[in-house]
Image (spheres, rainbow, N blue to C red):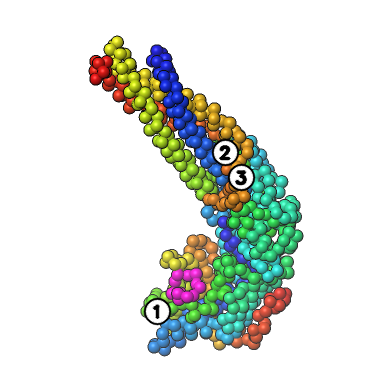
Amino acid sequence: MVGPVGTARRARPRAAAGAVLLAAVLAAARPAPAQTAREIVDRVDRMLRGASSRADVVMEIATEHWTRSLEMRVWSLGTAYALIRVVAPPREAGSATLKAGDEVWNYLPRVDRTIKVPPSLMMGSWMGSHFTNDDLVKESRVIDDYDIAIGFEGERQGVAVWEFVLTPKPTAAVVWGRVVQQVRKADLMPTWARYYDERGTLIRTMTFGDYRRFGSRLVPAVMTVRPEDKPDESTTVRYRDLEFDVRLSPAFFSLRSLQERR
Amino acid sequence: MVWWRIAWRNLWRNRRRTLITASALAVGFFGAVLMVALDDGISAELLDNGTGVLTGQVQLHARGWMPERSLYATIDGDAGIDVGALLARLRAVPGVAAAAPRVWAGGLLSAGHQTEGAVLMGADMSLEPGVSRILGTLVAGRAPRAGARELAIGSELARKLRVAAGAEVVVVAPAADGSTGNDVYRVSGVFRTGLDQLDGSYAVAPLGALQSLLALAPGRVHEVAVRLPDPWAAPAVARAIAAALTDAGHAAAGGPLDVTVEPWASFNPEVAEYLQLITASNGLVVGIVFLFAIFGVANTSLMGAYERRREFAVVRALGVGPAGVARTVVYEGLALGVLALAAGIAVTAPVLVAWHHTPLNLGWLIGNLELAGALVRPVLRVQYSLHGPVMGATGLLVTAVLAALYPAVRAARVPPADALAGR
């Protein structure tokens, strides 16, 4: 079978939203020592996400066969909503992805159609990147979907860190067998996350860097995903601008705004 | 020679008994040959449908195409190849009837609010029918036109998308340049092959249209499917093709190609395994048929030998060794076998011919079956082959001789003096 790998237009915004969330997850602790792992992760999550956000993002995808760069604008509201619109290059401009709850919609400006990503393709690549559609939907749910334990607490290369082991709850529809995330204790910034399948094989690694302030919040401005089976390939998401707690209503995340070519 | 004559004469000493015994063997032959021929019919049907609907009997891919079926793994690399020249080289290989290039991709089809994942196949609309029947199974509409943005889709896929021939669908697929290929296609036709996988998720588009959607140059194809008149020749023809394409002597015609050339057994292992099973069961069937026959034949043969105790004693008294006596009994068995074989052939041949030309259609009783990923019509037809009659004849003659061995030993051991004295 030819696995339908590439799905429609995957909205970049999700990835960005995902990154924000992950970063949040990782960053959470302004640690009161008695915090549980779950509380810390939740705090990181909230910090990185904010109630809402608007971001300008550049995504660079490098594969064995091509490299490309996409500029995107991303809006998010809570964990439920995200809208990602490609701004450049011109050929892709107008392509957009809407995440509303568990659903992912893609807008194709060339044919002026909106397509809902079917469940069977949620694991497909989003916009040809190393993110999946599922990443857009699921990253917001770390606290709900995983049991979280501290796997390591101490110094790594002179930096005090936690390493959280995230194990999917039996009822959670999660594709990973296990996720391990490292968070710096000092500022609650995530440094990396490793994704394992059910057999314990490392599938991909996400690394965070270029920690900087946008407004009052410190966030990792760069996030890179690298698939283990293709170490020469990667997708890097870089925040150019990030604004938290912007005024957005759920009505903004509609199919109609998905199709607006702004 | 004299022993043969004696054996032959002895055979007719009790005509009725001989005829009955010969009949048993002939019926055994009839049954064995017919069952093998029926199995061969099923095998041929399975093979024909397993490879004829879509895959062809031999396939050519870039090395590294399997198992990932990467969009980028086109024949002869990213630069592509002169497809016309490649096809000409393939058709020049003896045993090749036709060849057709293909492009494969995974993508989405969307119509209205329905979106489904699909396997997209780009096919040369004029060459494809020479290799596969998929476009011959249209139940609505027509095949896509070369060059047009049209699709033929499986009936189950059409049902899931809630479209009929003539409808528009959006096709979305990741393209080779990293972009997301998307375009509006018209469903020109709906096919129903009877195979769930094809009907439920396959969409066939003209080669050029799909290549442009996928940002693949016209020379970039993933597969060349080859049809052979004789599917059983696939391994040999595949080797011949591989040799022809990698032969340095053909360098002028495009140079050695880094491709894999596989016979259907490689990409259709279920069918291959099923056929092996059928072949193995043939031997078993023939064995069982003649196992039944052997006791009947041995019985009559033993009685015949026993009746002639005095005769054997006289022969022994005249100076013939025990081996000579044994030989005549074995010859007798062999003669019986030949007689039975002649009768068996006389009975079997017309039935085989008649059945071959008018297959028994059980379609009214049971619908089409999907077996090992291949469609099988419930039509009992018989297939001519050499191995069926050869197996049957071998089984028959071996049975006749084996059945004569024990009586032969008994006959050889007749003590002349005692037998003549009536003791």
| Crowding at mark 3 (Cα within 10 Å: few <14, some 14-19, many 20+) | few
Query: Which stretch did the figure color magenta?
Result: A167-178
Pick whichever of labels 2 and 3 is earlier in the sequence. 3
Q: Nearer the viewer, residue B43 or B360?
A: B360
Distance of mark 1 from mark 2, alpha carbons?
A: 70 Å
Chain assignment, label 1: A
| Crowding at mark 2 (Cα within 10 Å: few <14, some 14-19, many 20+) | many
- Please provide percent x and percent y for residue B390: 49, 31
Q: Amino acid at mark 3?
A: Asn
**Numbered tag placed on residue B361 in the rendering:** 3
Q: How many marks?
A: 3
Labelled pair 1, 2 in contact (Cβ < 8 Å): no
Chain assignment, label 3: B
Question: Of discs 1 and 2, which sits in the foreground?
Answer: 2
Marks 1 and 2 on same chain:
no
Distance of mark 2 from mark 3, alpha carbons?
A: 12 Å
* Vertical comparison of B179 with A183: above or below: above
